[in-house]
Amino acid sequence: MNRSYPWSSFCSTLALALPLLLSAQSNGTKLQGLLPSGRVNVEVLEMWSPPKLAELAQRLQQAAQADPTWFQEQVRQAVPGQPLPYHPKLGLTGKEYKEFLALSDSVQMKPVRTAHITVEPTRVGWRFGTATSLAALQNVEIDTVTNVVRSPFGELGAADPITPSAEQQATGPWGGPRWRLEAVDTTTMSGSVAQLAIGKHLATGRTVILYDARRLDKGQLAARESLFLLVVR
């Protein structure tokens, strides 16, 4: 007996799938203007901060580790977006804590070396080829049909895009599509957390590639990749 597919079921399926399809098409269009095909040079940026800030941050971290319950309670009670109120248990004097907060605004991302990437078009999007000099990106694939990224850490799904903001002091404002994976078993503390974002740096117009991924094994860091790249124009 011939049974037709219920029209209501078709409409429901379409309603669920349409936003995903439109998002995938939108990201694919954006990437066409951001990802140059072939081999291109990139600047590798790393976080830089004054040595004094590193010293103060280390002491604050040691103080937090000495009494984690107290420190976590201070964080819980803190006003969102505001620094913790000063307390001697932070391991710094009042003057040093003010200096720590002031120096925190001086953190910057600075170029440390030049590398190259190879962007290869695929049937469903793009892939960073094996000729890419940064091993962490090799064979990472962006599927613009299903709007996912396939990586050694797992499959990253579409996430909220990065939005240019004045709070991006270290890099300068930039924004673009982002994919994210958060798959950690809270019982075993094993799994992976990763994100890939490709966007445009507002001040320079250059393409930004952010790739950050971690794999945990029973609470221990088993693997870590972290890259912030600016395509050389």
Image: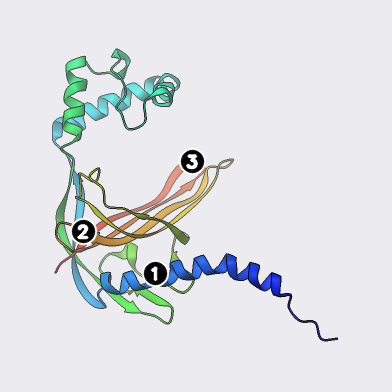
Q: Which residue is mark 2?
A: 201
Type of amino acid under label 3: Gly
Q: Earlier in the sequence, mark 2 or mark 1?
A: 1
Quadrant in which the N terminus appears? bottom right
Q: Earlier in the sequence, mark 1 or mark 3?
A: 1
Q: Are marks 2 and 1 in contact (CB under 8 Å)?
A: no
Q: Is residue 115 above or below residue 4?
A: above
Q: Residue 144: where, in percent of width, then height?
A: 42, 72
Helix, strand or loop at mark 1: helix
Image quadrant where residue 92 sits: top left
Helix, strand or loop at mark 3: loop
Q: Which residue is mark 3?
A: 219
Specify few, some or many for label 3: CA neighbours under 10 Å numbering under 14, 14-19, or 20 or more.
some
Type of amino acid under label 2: His
Image-based side of 117 in relation to 123, left or right = left
Q: Is residue 80 above or below residue 157?
A: above
Q: Is residue 71 above or below residue 164?
A: above
Q: Residue 134: where, in percent of width, then height?
A: 27, 64
Q: Please give the label number shown on residue 184.
A: none
Is residue 131 in view from this perspective?
no
Image-based side of 94 in relation to 77, left or right = left
Q: CA distance from mark 2 to mark 3?
A: 35 Å
Q: Earlier in the sequence, mark 2 or mark 3?
A: 2
Q: Which residue is mark 1?
A: 26
